[in-house]
Every structure is written in C-alpha cells, then in structure tokens.
Image (cartoon, rainbow, N blue to C red):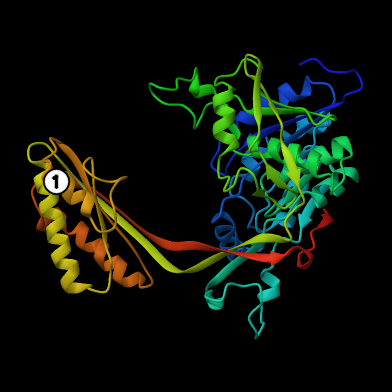
Amino acid sequence: MSSSPSIRYAHIGCGAGFAGDRPDAAVALVEALAERDGARYLFFELLAERTLAEAQLRKLEDPAMGYATHLFAFLEPIVASCLTHGIPIITNGGAANPVAAAQRLRRQLKTQGLDAKIACVMGDDLGDALDGQTARADWLPADCPLEEIVSCNVYIGAEAVTQALRDGADIVIGGRLADPSMAVGALRHAHGWAADDWQHLAVATAAGHLLECGTQITGGYFADARRKTVADLANLGCPIAEVGSDASLVITKMPGSGGCVTEQTVKEQLLYEVHDPAAYLTPDVTLDVSRVRLETLGPDRVAIHDIHGHPAPATLKGNLGLRGLWFGEAGISYAGPDAVERAQLALEILRQRLGARLPQLRPHFDLIGVASLFNDGSGEWLEKRLREAPAVEDVRLRLGIVDRDRDAIDTALQELEALYLNGPAGGGGVRRQLGESLRTQSFLIARERVTPFVSWQ
C-alpha cells in the first residue's frame, strides 16, 4: 500500500470474535502487532445477546463474578507482552461486572510484578434503574414482564473508550460496548477523530465491524468443503485492520498463518448482520456501505473504499435478558437394520405418553440423521422425509421442550429415558439435560438518557 509519509497508521487486531473462541490465537497476533510501526491495539469481542443475562445470573450467585466466563483465558497469555510493547487491550468481556474483572486482573498482575492502568467503561447497565421501582420505565417494551428481567443493558459507543485511552489506559474493560465501537474508540484515540466526524467514524466503524467476528473474515465461517476452499483451517490467523489518518482501510491477517483474506471473505463479513447496507445503525455513526469498492492489494490484503457516514441515530439499542422459562432435551440412538423404523416407533410412543400425561407441553421431535436442522415445529418436514423412506442405519431421536413448568419437562425427559426398557429394541446412549432458558427482548432508548463513564481500578 503506497502512502504519503505524512499519513499515520493505526493497526488493530481482533483476538476473539465470541466468548467461545480460541484463547491461544491472540498470542501470535500480539507478536505480529508488536513488529509494526505506529499505534497498535488489540481487542476481544466476547459478548452475544444472551451472554449478559447469563453473566448477571453468575453475579447474583457471587458478587465477585459476572464477567465473561473465559475472559482470563484470553488475557493471561498476552497481557504481559501487550504491556511491554505498549499495545492497549480493549474488551467488552467485563460483561455484567467489569469492576470485578479489573480487580481480579489487578491482583494477578501484582503477583507477576506488573502494573497497568486499568479503566472500566460503565453506564451500559440500566438494571439499577429498575430495582424497586413501582412504575414501569417508559423505555421498556409494554409487553415485558418486569419480574422476569434479569439484565438490562444498552449498546454504548466509543466515547468512554476513547477517553480512557487518552487518559493513559493500558487495558479497557467494558460491559455492553457495541462490537465495532471498541475499534472506533481506538481509532479516535490514534488519529484524534472527533465524535461528530461522521466520515472518519464510518471508516472506523467499518473496520470494527469487519474485525469483530475474528477469524470469520480470515476464512473460518467462509470455508466450504468444495466451493470455497481455505488453506490450513486448523491454524487460522487473526485479522488485522490497517487504518490511516487519511481514512484508508486495509484488512489483512497475521503473516504465516492459515486462512485467507480475499474480496470474497471481506464481502461476506461486511454484510454480516447488516439490516440496511445504506443505513446500518450503530451507537457512533450511521454507516453506509452500499457503494463500497474492494481492491486486492496483494496476498491477504484487501482495501475497502467508498465508505460513507451519516449522523448517529437519536436512540440507542437496549437488550433485556429474561428468565422464567426452562429448556430440556434428551436423546436416544438406534442403529442397524430398520433403525429409522424403530426410532419412528419410539417417537410415536413418546407422543402418546406425553399427550396423555402432559398435554400442556409442546414437545419438539427430531430424528437426527433423517430430519433435524431443516425440521420444523409442526413436524411436517420430518413426515415428508419419512415418506421418502431414507436408507439410514444410524439415527438419533431427540426430544426438546421449552416451558415454564420445570417439573413437567423433567417428567417428559424421564419418559424418553424409560424407552431403554419400554421402547423398541436396541435403543442406547440416552443423554438428558434440563436448565434455565434465557431469552432476550430489544428496546430503544433516547441517547441522552444513557451516560457512559470511565471508572479506574
């Protein structure tokens, strides 16, 4: 990439795209960032829609918990190197308890003889605003049962991240920081971009959006067995964005790693979860990628041109985590001659037994190997597949139920287990589980009613 000597570059790497990502992947990423000139940043995206509700439940059980379950598996291998090389770390892995995460990190650093400026970005959690109130908050959905709310968070933008970095933070731990906003905060810090510089913020948001799912853009989710081959999938390289002070944007990856960065991988990630390419609403800017042009600069180097930005929306998106439901599932396998017919017979036994004993439940049945992923709640797809008489000698009957009555679900799962002796021959490998089923509900809230702030730990 040719450039003017006056152009400064910031290099941002994403070490994780979700809470269950590979903790070891960021080690090589930090090494790659350390070799680059200019501003370098590393971020971990560790939240999903239900993650905060799960984190809040852990916090209720133990006030010292509530951050992302594997947060320290990601931080521990790289934090010393990042401090040595001056690479700030940004993460939303603080989840429901950024302060507790920061305090634990502080204790661990002390045992290693290390020190760091740790900033927590707060203000996304509106749960306290609901505690003990007698009147419904006017921004809550009208159909939301107050007694079932376990978490209430707003997707906040980059302002507090930028402020923390300007004030010297080595590590920034937030809660529901919007995914791309972590990169926006870093780029505003690196290049001095203002909060209302919509064009530059659009490029920063596009960079964050392209990076936020980690190796999804370097070939992971892109790969297909035949049509889209990707080399060395077992060793995918984390993505890196190179963003110039002139708002140029290039996506690449760690050198010598598996995977690929191509115009095709970039296109897929660019449109990922985008409801309107001409007006993608984020906390920092309204992003327009409807006229984007891609340019291959070399192996694993793709430039993105013609990104446009418009003023940020007047409202922010909020997300409620709701409890009150339970989810149970159980399965039993059949193999060998007539496996499908025996599994179908087991299914009919369950239908009769559950219909008689637990008519209030709405069980869902799959025959894995015959109909599962394409199966529907009514069972029409399953019936169609069975009429086709599939030649399968390895099939698993799965029962799934969501309901408010935990005991009734448990009884239904027991009915499946009873097939060991009361059902068709040859059933085996029964597994069952029952747990709380958290669900989410979105809402909009006026931006001025949310006040993110920095808390130093």
Write the residue at 44% across / 22% down. Answer: 228
* Camera sees residue 117: no
> What SS does tag 1 mark?
helix
Q: Quadrant of residue 355?
A: bottom left
Image coordinates for residue 7, horizontal then vertical, percent:
88, 24
Residue 431, compared with residue 391, is above or below; it is below
Image coordinates for residue 194, horizontal then vertical, percent:
87, 45
10 displayed left or right of 217: right
Image coordinates for residue 289, horizontal then vertical, percent:
65, 38
Image coordinates for residue 457, horizontal then vertical, percent:
82, 53
How would you rate the neighbour count of disc 1 (Cα within 10 Å): few for under 14, some for 14-19, many for 20 or more? some
Question: Which amino acid type is marked by label 1?
Answer: Leu
Q: Nearer the viewer, residue 344 or 241?
A: 241
289 displayed left or right of 393: right
Write the residue at 74% across / 48% down. Answer: 285
Write the residue at 14% across / 36% down. Answer: 393
